Image (cartoon, coloured by chain):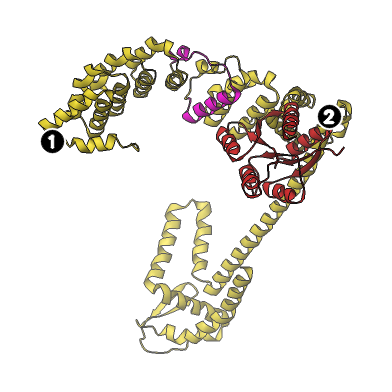
Amino acid sequence: MLHTLALYSVIIMVFLPDYIQAQGPEIRNDSYGISQVKDSDSLQVSKNAGTTKKNSFSSDPVKSSTYKSEQLFQRIFGVKNLKALEKDLNEYGNSHLPPFMRRIFLEIVEKSFIYPIVFLIITLILVLLFNIISVIIILRYTNHQKNRRERYINIYRTRYEEILSGYLFHDIDWNTASILIKKKNKLLNRSVLISVLSNFQENLRGDFDNQIQEIFINLGLQTNAIKLIKSPFYYKKVSGIRQLTLLHPKGAYHFIKPYLNHSNDMVRAEAQASYIVLHPEDPFCFLKALTRSFNQWTQLTVFNLYRSYQLKVPSFVQYLNSENINVRNFSLVMITYFQQVENSPVILKMLESPQETTRFHCIRAINDLLLYEGRELIKCRYPFETRKNQIEIIKALRNIGNQDDFDFLENIFLTGFVTARTEACRSLYFISAEGHQRLIRMNQDADLKLEQYLAHITDSRN
Amino acid sequence: MQPQKILLAEDNKLILETIARSLTREGYEILKAYDGKECLQILEDHKVDLIITDLFMPFINGHEVISTLRNERKDQTPILVLSAGGGEENVLKAFELGADDFMVKPFSLMELCVRVRKLLASKR
């Protein structure tokens, strides 16, 4: 690339002046018959069409070059446009710029219209070359530094792994290990040590658990983790929370608790996930303290952690009174998942919630937990519900409904929107054989295209 | 009496070395592979009594290693699978392909040694 640019600049410097010289007379005698001569400050326009006039500039090479470049400019942009541009720029400088910048700006404008175009192009090329060279130097330097850092980390990682492994297998005692762990006070080495210990802790458990936590404390690495937690950067906070949870679970609680309601989603999610691990006896107790949103990704993470660690299942009914809508919805989903049927009165009460999603989860809970006592309630709510919840009510009736619901479903099938009609048809069809007969009778009275609905609902793909 | 040979395939060097150290202390001879490809190469030249393999490795993963051994090479050497937590589907797939036992990370080295002993005894 550099070679190409250098070649271009040489071509421009060598051939362009010759080209301009060769084109000179023609430029001066353009199709409009306009010839321009710049004499110090003023621009003279001569309207001698068809005459090839040799003027006094041809004897002075600098002035001649300036003159030729101007001719080129004028040929490209046109005389009127150039004049107008210069005038506009000067006006802009005078009216919009502060006094300290005005003079510099006007000088630049003036010189831009005086110096030859070749000079400007060469300057631009040189600036470009300088930029490219600077970028290459910076890239090479940073790459070199990065490789050096990686080599350093790898060397110390291998050393620390050998020493810590020796200590964990009782080949050496702590005093010897402590002496062998060089540069342990250096920040980078401390992060390497934390990484090695985390790797042990993430993959191994049993006897090593306590030993690794002891090493973490003995080396004072918890101070680094605490510093990370207090950092203003969210990703450092996340890293600190993770390190403390993994390597210093006994002391982590007090540091992590304030971050349960942190404004950053990532930090909050990490703190909430840590809480599950740190409180196996009551893993979801943090739900009571949540004031900010408990997003769906965190709900999934928390649930996955709960399953991985096979923790005790609490009664989620205690969180249904939470003011946090996410907590209420999550609790309803958990009640359904863990089949906590004993909470049915509270679930039915949640049908009165002003939140659409809460009512949606509530209807789904009534369906999945087969709460027959909720059947009439959801039917009463049907006209006031959103379409999404109406569909959920019809689906619920398929499982908990009976022949008393046929009129209700029939009405929906005749008057409802398409999805509601499909679901009503499905519910009628699957509640009992009598429901199927009702559908056939309805179809005889009026052409309801029942065959199409039946084909859809009986297709296993739907 | 010749020590029993165990081939250990794991891309995490620290865990590989730690398990190797633990099993060497138990009196086994350990062959190490840092990825699935190396594992299969070693098996071409060496006869081993047990294979311990991670599921997620570079080049060739644990599932492919098991499948190649059982289906292509008709090798019936016992295989113990090491899997990351929460990957039940992967463990089930490993069993379908012909794995004999599995352990979920984080695991106890003592438990690993017991399982290795049991697998080797069942082979005999």
Quarter residue B83 falls in: top right
Which residue position holds label 1? Answer: A447
Q: Which chain identifier belongs to the yellow chain?
A: A
Q: Quadrant of residue B103?
A: top right
**Front residue of this view, candidates B86 and A233:** B86
SS for callout 2:
helix
Residue extending farthest left: A445
- Give residue A358's mark: none
The residue at 81%/28% (across/down) is: A168
Q: Is residue A337 magenta?
A: no
Category of crowding for the residue at label 1, using alpha-carbon neighbours closer than 10 angstroms: few (below 14), some (14–19), many (at least 20): few
| Position above or below: A46 against B29 | below
Mark 1 secondary-structure assignment: loop
How packed mark 2 is, by other alpha carbons closer than 10 Å (few <14, some 14-19, many 20 or more), is many
x and y percentages locating residue B52 in the rendered image: 71, 38
Name the quadrant of the N terminus of chain B: top right
In the rendered image, the quadrant that contains the C terminus of chain B is top right
Dominant secondary structure of the residues highlighted in magenta in the image: helix
For this view, does A2 lie left or right of residue A458? Answer: right
Q: Is A315 in the magenta?
A: yes
Disc 2 residue type (three-letter): Tyr
Colour red belongs to chain? B
Residue A226 in sight in this render: no
Q: CA distance from mark 2 to mark 1?
A: 83 Å
The answer as to whether the residues below labels 2 and 1 share one chain is yes
Nearer to me, A194 or A98? A194
Residue A455 place in picture, x, y as percent: 26, 38
Residue A151 showing in the rendered view: yes
* Magenta span: A294-322
**Disc ID at residue A167:** 2
